[in-house]
Amino acid sequence: MREFKVTGIISAAGLSERMGSFKPMEEFNGEPFILLIARKMLGVCSKVVVVTGFKKEIIEETLKSFIEKSELETAYNPDYEKGMFVSLKRGIEAAGDFDFVLYHFVDQPFFEDEFYKLFLRQIEESADWIQPSYKGKAGHPVLISRKICDEILGGGYNDLRSVRDSDKFSRKYWECGRSEILLDFDTKRDIEDYKKLRD
């Protein structure tokens, strides 16, 4: 069975306006979001790229020990205020040699290691876009093939939704049994509500 090479891309370039503080540095289980996610993704990806923008120096300093000791790097997106799709492009540019990218938002720090292992087992030659679902609703993170990434860099799309819905690509949805794929932490209240549900 073929082994697929996966590069992780963490989108951490935004302004964090709704959070009221710098989102990548918010803590979950005692660790900053960005550090927690990067560590978990390094366990399943051959390389991880953290796309930075707003307050990039803080992220670079936080990840310094990882950058020095592992296959993790940061990629600065100077146009971060133009939205997440621009940051995804910047991450793909820095992704190197890969078959798929695991595209991950910085506001989903709650997945356990096993989730990532199971998700990457869903990769197959016939699927260009692989997305987890819960009770029929698709969520994040997403696995995106090299074919799609090349198309994105080619400039044929303006947002990720149009990529997902394109007839040019085959899609696979994995019923993962985890409602967290539908969640993200946009505000401090979101974090507190999640903790209450798990207590």
Image (cartoon, rainbow, N blue to C red):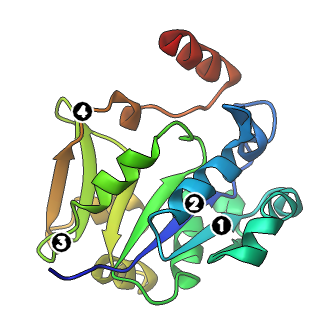
Residue 115: give x, y in percent of width and height: 36, 46
Element marked by disc 2: strand
Element marked by disc 1: strand
- Mark 4 vs 3: CB contact within 8 A: no
| Amino acid type, label 2 | Ile
Residue annotated with mark 4:
177
Element marked by disc 4: loop
Point out the frontmost of discs 4 and 1: 4
Residue annotated with mark 3:
169
For the point 62% across and 77% down, the residue is: 71
Measure how far apart labels 4 and 1 are at the Cα level: 29 Å
Q: Nearer the viewer, residue 155 or 84?
A: 84
- Mark 2 vs 4: CB contact within 8 A: no
Judge the density around disc 1: few (<14), some (14-19), many (≥20) Cα neighbours within 10 Å: many
Residue annotated with mark 2:
10
Q: Is residue 11 above or below residue 124?
A: above
| Amino acid type, label 1 | Val
Measure how far apart labels 4 and 3 are at the Cα level: 25 Å
Residue 116: give x, y in percent of width and height: 39, 53
Residue annotated with mark 1:
51
| N-terminal label among 2 and 4 | 2
Residue 66: give x, y in percent of width and height: 73, 67
Question: What is the total number of numbered labels drawn onto the structure image?
Answer: 4
- Mark 4 vs 1: CB contact within 8 A: no
Measure how far apart labels 3 and 1 are at the Cα level: 25 Å
